[in-house]
Amino acid sequence: MSRRLTPSKRHHAAGELTDAQIVARLKAHQEPPGHPQSTVFRKTPDGRHIRELKMLFEAAGVLPYLERKLRRSGPKPRLSVRTLLIALFYVAGEWNTYWRTHVANFLASLEPQDAVDLGVQPLDALLKPISYDVVCKQARRLEQALREGWTDEDGTHCHLRWFTTALIYASMPPRIARMIEHVAMDATAVPSWARWKQPDDDGRHGSDPDATLSHRSGNSEHGPGPFYGYFLTTGIAVRSWHLTRSTKTVKFGPPVPPYVVSLIFETAAANVATTGIDAMEDALSLCPNISKLVVDRGYSQLGPSFNRPIHTINIDITMDYKEPARTGVKPVRLGPSGYPAFLHAGTFLHACTPPNWRKPPAGLKGEELREFYTERAQRFGLRVHRHLDGGAKQLSSPTRDGRLNIDPNRTAGPRRQPLYPPPADLTGIFKNLPQEILHQGLITAIVEDLDYFQWPPWGTPLHDQVYGQRNPAENIFAQIKDENGLSKKVNRIMGSAARHIMCLAQAVWYNLKLTRKGEEELKATKQARRTANKTRTATNTPEQREDADQPASSQPAGDAPDSPARPPPPT
């Protein structure tokens, strides 16, 4: 029985085609083999952005570690680690997706020169695009290595957090990193595309291998309740501010571009306080001048588990409070001396504060309520005198500043303040209270006393202006989460490492866009300055005479400059 042998199909060698034919076939955006879908992006990658990403990874210094980790024996792979990372970050940042099929489309639609520069493949093999299967295999190896972590031969411990910090630092100009002093931070829920179900034998609630079940707060799109997925914690640079003698306004520093300075991606069941502390430490390692943090109620309600470690690294917190902290008045003893004070809504009040000033009346609202908090802080509030090591603070008493008179021998204080003697309930609230401690001017409050303290006081116009710095940061959070493909409607990838790299790619791409915008504005400013200088120079320069070769006629001394010419004398 004879068997007919069918010769295998052979592709034309690239050398038999001209450069124009190679470019024409590459620009056809042919679908790479192995595609699970037929949809192909009809977009040509921008070579400038590709070279920008190439410089980013080289500056971050992560490529040698990843190449050593993913290196295998045998022939050199056609898809290198550098090319894969550039493709992943370009597709996630520019095309707002992380699908492997789109990464394969990106590699297939590269211009020949860009493909050679990236090292995708040599010129004689450009007609054979990298398949979808190769992209999936290499991407999974990269994600698994970063998720599990490893120790390199030089002793560096490599993992997702190390990878994230290096790339965010490389995406910011060094001068911007030194300018950043204040940061706003928020944690947002990222639901998984997989559906939630009852836990199986392994304790998993769905097909997503890393997603977990937790609770999220409500917003305009959904109410509070359980969700299945992850939490994304992001730190955004905000404009710095300083207090002045004014009780109505704060002094803001120069504008700072809202760069992403930290990013942590964890499962929904991860500890929110620990994740926030890690994000703040990463931001501080990149921007060493950070001194203040703005957070919402989700962090302020954590109390000692979050606020105390942040205070320990000498960072002040501006926060909002939930209802119990707004309505309850708590007597406290501060520092080693046991200085008595009342704590309400994050403000320390002198022990001689009358009961009607310890918290606002029930019917007070709007501008009247803000005026109450402003007047109370001015009269009875303990102010920050200076910061001490380890998160402790030295507070200034209103009796020291002349804002409060508690001396019964005087009817008015140094600034004509009325007399506020110790209230009748003081000895009942604070047992064994020596009277001389009420006159103490400077109080040392240890870090354990400052879990809910903040300055400027909550409820005042100063606090509203400082806390309002979160509004620009909220817009950035929305861009990274919803507008860039993290919403459940368009995002179908699963696994914590893949989701983490996608969020990181979008944050880095956002930083790079800010850098491009800053460079364009600087270039436009310089061009406008040069144009203005040229205009000023042309205005100050006398006009050139038309007949430069003819001698200029001399004007008689007695004539006016604009007088008509004198007639010739008679002959």
Image (cartoon, helix red, strand yellow):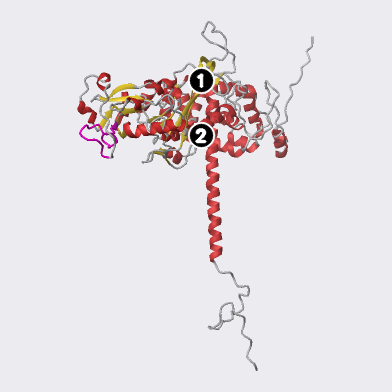
Query: Is residue 403 in view?
Result: yes
Q: Which of 441 and 76 is in front in this view?
A: 441
Q: Is residue 41 left or right of residue 243?
A: right
- The amino acid sitting under disc 1 is Ser
Q: Where is residue 443 in the image (x, y as percent from the top left)?
A: 26, 30
Image disc number at residue 472: 2
Q: Check whether the beta carbons of the residues at disc 1 and disc 2 lie within 8 A of each other.
A: no
The residue nearer to you, when weighing 179 against 242, is: 242
> Is 514 located above or below residue 504 in the figure?
below
Query: Image height check: is 108 above or below 174?
Result: above
Q: Viewer-proximal residue, 381 or 420?
A: 420
The N terminus, quarter of image:
top right
Please state the extent of the stretch shown in magenta in the rendering. 394-414
Residue 410 magenta-drawn? yes
Q: Distance between the residues labelled 1 and 2?
A: 20 Å
The image position of residue 227, as x and y in percent, is 54, 16
> What amino acid type should be assigned to the residue bearing mark 2?
Pro
Residue farthest along the bottom direction in this orientation: 571
Locate residue 399, reporting x and y percent. Answer: 26, 34
Q: Which mark is residue 217?
A: 1
Residue 249 rendering spot, x and y as whole percentages: 42, 39
Q: What element carries label 2?
A: helix
Question: Local crowd at mark 2 within 10 Å, few (<14), some, or many (≥20)?
Answer: some
In primary-sequence order, the first of circles 1 and 2 is 1
Main SS of residues in magenta:
loop
| Total tally of numbered discs in the picture | 2
Q: Is residue 441 left or right of residue 82?
A: left
Determine whether the residue tagged by mark 1 lies in a helix, strand or loop: loop
> Which residue in the rendered view is the most extreme toward the top?
201
> Hey, which quadrant is residue 571 in on the image?
bottom right
Q: Look at 59% across and 14% down and name the residue there.
A: 195
Viewer-proximal residue among 61 and 379: 379
